[in-house]
């Protein structure tokens, strides 16, 4: 705020009762758990949560990607009422306008935080195409698949926005994501391919050794081996003019 022109500093940036934007990052001494920001490994962990959402499709849902990225679960997905992580933790860390619901959009960090949260969601959609299922019913009002998102106009449903960005929405995120863990199927495939390569190598090497050694053995044999001697004996018998042939 101090970097704004003096006139802007005196003005209310937005029409709230809260006055100018306030930040006191990591300053909430009453809540030590919100004195830190989320870590990169928290992003990695939440990207591995399998299901998009789980009953009751609320802030108490456990093992739900939606509730985890929102920040009501530990980053691995287990719901814990005292935990604040990821998106919520970033809000609460700001400890001021940006940490107060309904005022937080007044802090410009809001846009960055929510854009990054959407980028994580986009990456999750990409990694879990098989379990990317938006709740059809039983979610709170406005949060079922075909409900329209309030307050957008013209109306747009949750289902329409439950889509990967570049392919469906016309924008993309430039972010480096932690490596995806190898799945069991991939481990089995790699093991089978590696085993086949090892067998092929052993077969090739063995064949070469056998051929080389048999070539060597053949090479050492006298040109006139037993069979040639045999022919030789026969020939000499035929040629022996002293023996009568019957
Ligand atoms: O502005 C917000 C403030 C929040 C505080 C929490 C919390 O978990 O206590 N969550 C928030 C979300 C916001 O958007």
Image (cartoon, helix red, strand yellow):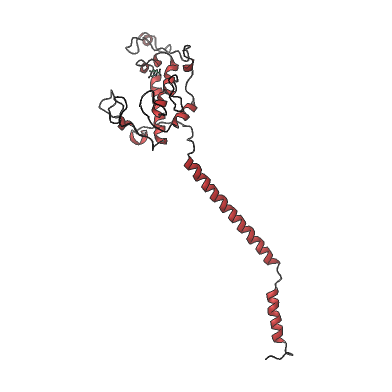
Kindly give the residue lying farthest to the top in the view shown.
10
Percent x, y of residue 46: 44, 29
In which of the image's four quarters is ligand 1 placed?
top left
Q: In front here: 174 or 135?
A: 135
For this view, does 171 lie left or right of residue 178? left
The residue lying at 47 percent from left, 26 percent from top is 42
Q: Quadrant of the N terminus?
A: top left
Look at the image and tell me whether residue 157 can be seen. Answer: yes
Question: Looking at the image, is 191 positioned above or below residue 218?
Answer: above
Q: Is residue 224 visible?
A: no
Position of residue 115 relative to residue 220, above or below, is above
Residue 236: x percent and y percent? 71, 83
- Residue 83 vs residue 111, the one in the foreground: 83
Query: What residue sits 41% from the left and 32% below the top?
Result: 124
Question: Picture quarter containing residue 230?
Answer: bottom right
**How many marks overall?**
0
Residue 68, percent across and down? 42, 26
Relative vertical location of residue 89 with respect to residue 234 in this rendering, above or below: above
Image quadrant containing the C terminus: bottom right
Left or right? Give the position of 241 relative to 104: right
Side of 199 relative to 236 (left or right): left
Q: Residue furthest left?
A: 154
Residue furthest to the right = 242
Residue found 39% across the figure and 28% down from its top: 66
Where on the picture, by quarter, is residue 232? bottom right
Give percent across and percent down for residue 105.
Answer: 36, 18
């Amino acid at each position: 705020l101090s970097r704004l022109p003096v006139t802007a500093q005196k003005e209310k940036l937005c029409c709230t009762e809260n006055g100018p934007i306030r930040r006191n990052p990591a300053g909430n001494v009453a809540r030590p758990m919100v004195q830190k920001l989320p870590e990169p490994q928290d992003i990695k962990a939440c990207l591995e949560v399998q299901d998009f959402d789980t009953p009751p499709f609320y802030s108490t849902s456990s093992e739900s990607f939606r509730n985890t990225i929102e920040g009501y679960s530990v980053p691995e997905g287990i719901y814990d009422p005292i935990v604040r992580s990821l998106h919520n933790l970033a809000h609460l860390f700001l400890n001021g306008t940006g940490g107060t619901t309904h005022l937080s959009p007044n802090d410009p960090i809001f846009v960055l935080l929510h854009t990054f949260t959407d980028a994580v969601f986009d990456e999750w959609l990409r990694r879990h195409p098989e379990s990317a299922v938006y709740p059809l019913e039983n979610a709170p009002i406005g949060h079922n698949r075909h409900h329209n998102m309030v307050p957008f106009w013209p109306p747009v449903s949750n289902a329409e926005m439950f889509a990967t960005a570049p392919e469906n929405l016309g924008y993309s995120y430039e972010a480096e994501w932690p490596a995806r863990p190898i799945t069991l199927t991939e481990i089995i495939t790699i093991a089978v391919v590696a085993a086949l390569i090892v067998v092929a190598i052993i077969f090739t090497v063995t064949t070469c050794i056998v051929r080389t050694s048999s070539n060597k053995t053949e090479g050492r044999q006298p040109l006139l081996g037993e069979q040639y001697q045999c022919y030789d004996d026969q020939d000499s018998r035929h040629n022996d003019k002293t023996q009568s042939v019957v």
